[in-house]
Amino acid sequence: MVCKNKEITILREFQSRNEGLKHLQKMTLEQKINLSKNLILNCIETFGDQKVYISFSGGKDSAVLSSLACSLKPSILHLFSDTGCEYPETLAFIEAERQRGKNIVSVYPICRDGSMWTFERIVATYGYPLFSKAIANGIRTYRHAKTPITKQHALDYLARMYPKALSYLDCNISDLCCEKLKKSPLKRTARHMQMQCSIIGTLAEESQIRKRDWITYGSNIFFQKKDNQCRPLSFWTSQDIWSYIKLYRLPISILYNQGYKRNGCMYCGFGVCSERRKFGINRFERLAQTHPQQYKYMVSRWASLFKECGIPY
Ligand code: SF4
């Protein structure tokens, strides 16, 4: 029996999907858990339980996603992208989850010629992931444009959307890191294992892009884009994630006890600029306190770039 997507049924009651999202976000935790499980079930029944996988980062949202999915299918495959610049606490958490019986396969960023991509090699080859993906994309396009028209378009885009970024046009910045270290290896492995749909733990409230994407497609995007995706936590808030963790005493990485708001990669510069304003300290400054060895390595390589770009470290 195919499980109907309840989210679509609920959304029919609303004039706009924006209103529908607000309604879903206001539901109780119990209602959200039920709806999320229904979305995962819908995914499993559409593609088969051997053809879907959890995109697992080792962060708190991923931990909740894994808990919900494992309550339906305990042996469900988790693919973890080990970028080589994960916090040691993330790797320890992944190992602990394996010990608790989770089916986790690590994926590594191996180049077509068999060599390994490292963060340092990515920065040397393409540029540092700094500011935001959109800004880094604009700067990379400007710096490596093949035609004067492309260069001008990149310049116009940055001037219109991010005028401050015009000061950093000569800096070695790029948006390609995630593609090379994370997304491509994950997709290649999933293809190799004949997976048909990824289950990911993103929240619509995280960014305008994610919200707009949910409004267009909803949580389960099947047979619409190149890749099928199930995003059953889309309408959860960060507060819901913490409530679930507390309610079910869910183990999470100890990184969160050290003041970190998210796991991710140790040297990633995406989003770093707004952290001081929000939290009084940015992730690089925190790294100096919690992981002095890794901090020393980072500064020895990229302090001049941080200075050039006005990033406190
Ligand atoms: S999170 Fe940042 S450092 Fe990690 S792979 Fe993506 S861009 Fe690179």
Image: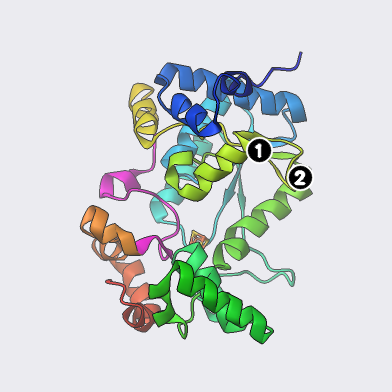
Q: Can residue 100 be seen in this view?
A: no
Question: What amino acid does circle 2 point to?
Answer: Met
Q: Is residue 267 magenta?
A: yes
Q: Which residue is drawn at 40% across and 34% down?
A: 237
Q: Is residue 17 visible?
A: yes
Residue farthest toward the front in the current orientation of the protein: 15
Residue farthest toward the top in the current orientation of the protein: 1
Between 168 and 120, the residue placed more toward the observer is: 168
Between 63 and 32, the residue placed more toward the observer is: 32
Q: Quadrant of residue 72?
A: top right
Look at the picture and state if 298 lies above or below 69: below
Q: Residue at x 73, y 45 (%)?
A: 225
Mark 2 surroundings: few (<14), some (14-19) or many (≥20) residues within 10 A: few
Question: What amino acid does circle 1 point to?
Answer: Tyr
Q: In which quarter of the image is residue 102?
A: top right
Q: x, y (%) of residue 84?
A: 51, 62
Look at the picture and state if 20 lies above or below 85: above
Q: Mark 1 points at which residue?
A: 53
Mark 1 surroundings: few (<14), some (14-19) or many (≥20) residues within 10 A: many
Quadrant (top left, top right, bottom left, bottom right) of the N terminus: top right
Q: Residue at x 69, y 68 (%)?
A: 111
Look at the picture and state if 134 lies above or below 296: above
Q: Which element type, helix, strand or loop, lies under badge 2?
A: loop
Spatial separation of the CA atoms under disc 2 and disc 1: 10 Å
The count of marks equals 2
Q: Is residue 59 magenta?
A: no
Mark 2 vs mark 1: give the one in front.
1
Q: x, y (%) of residue 148?
A: 65, 86
Q: Which element type, helix, strand or loop, lies under badge 1?
A: strand
Q: Name the residue under label 2.
A: 193
Q: What stretch is highlighted in magenta?
A: 251-272
